[in-house]
Image (cartoon, rainbow, N blue to C red):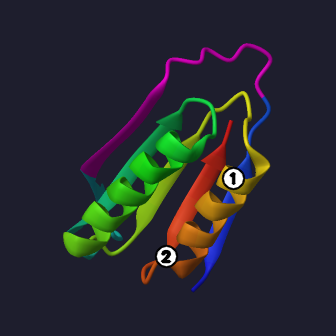
């Protein structure tokens, strides 16, 4: 599975603890129908609980047959082992996952 990672550097980061997930619609192309894609917002410290929430959100989008999932990550950091588990869950996703790290 291909994972796309985009890194953004921001001088001012607001950290509101959330792991939010939602489905959005985006144009698939100029001559194609609108395509649904999953969107997960991860704005909290990386720990076992937040990664479990992330994996649940990822599984929900997979179960909803979202063709792609975008993950926005804005975190002050946290547990290395929990971060590695989050990366493994992303790599194991059966659909393309686009990660944007801010």
Q: Is residue 70 left or right of residue 22?
A: right
Residue located at (68% from left, 18% from top): 13
Local packing at callout 1 (Cα closer than 10 Å; few below 14, some 14-19, many 20+) is some
The residue pinned by badge 2 equals 96
Q: Position of residue 19 (x, y in %)?
A: 42, 37
Secondary structure beneath label 1: helix
Counting the numbered discs, the total is 2
Point out the stretch of residues depicted in magenta: 10-23
Q: Is residue 16 left or right of residue 23?
A: right
Image: 38 above or below 53? below
Image: 63 above or below 12? below
Q: Nearer the viewer, residue 41 or 45?
A: 45
Image: 42 above or below 33? above
Q: Position of residue 56 (x, y in %)?
A: 35, 57
Local packing at callout 2 (Cα closer than 10 Å; few below 14, some 14-19, many 20+) is some
Labels 2 and 1: the sequence-earlier one: 1
In front: mark 2 or mark 1?
1
Residue located at (33% from left, 75% from top): 67
The residue pinned by badge 1 equals 83
């Amino acid at each position: 599975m291909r994972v796309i990672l985009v890194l953004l550097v921001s001088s001012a980061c607001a950290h509101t603890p959330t792991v939010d997930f939602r489905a959005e619609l985006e144009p698939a192309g100029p001559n194609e129908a609108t395509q649904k894609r999953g969107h997960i917002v991860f704005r909290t410290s990386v720990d076992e609980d937040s990664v479990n929430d992330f994996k649940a959100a990822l599984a929900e989008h997979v179960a909803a047959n979202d063709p792609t999932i975008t993950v926005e990550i804005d975190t002050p950091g946290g547990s290395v082992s929990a971060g590695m588990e989050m990366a493994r869950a992303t790599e194991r996703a059966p659909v393309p996952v686009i990660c944007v790290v801010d």
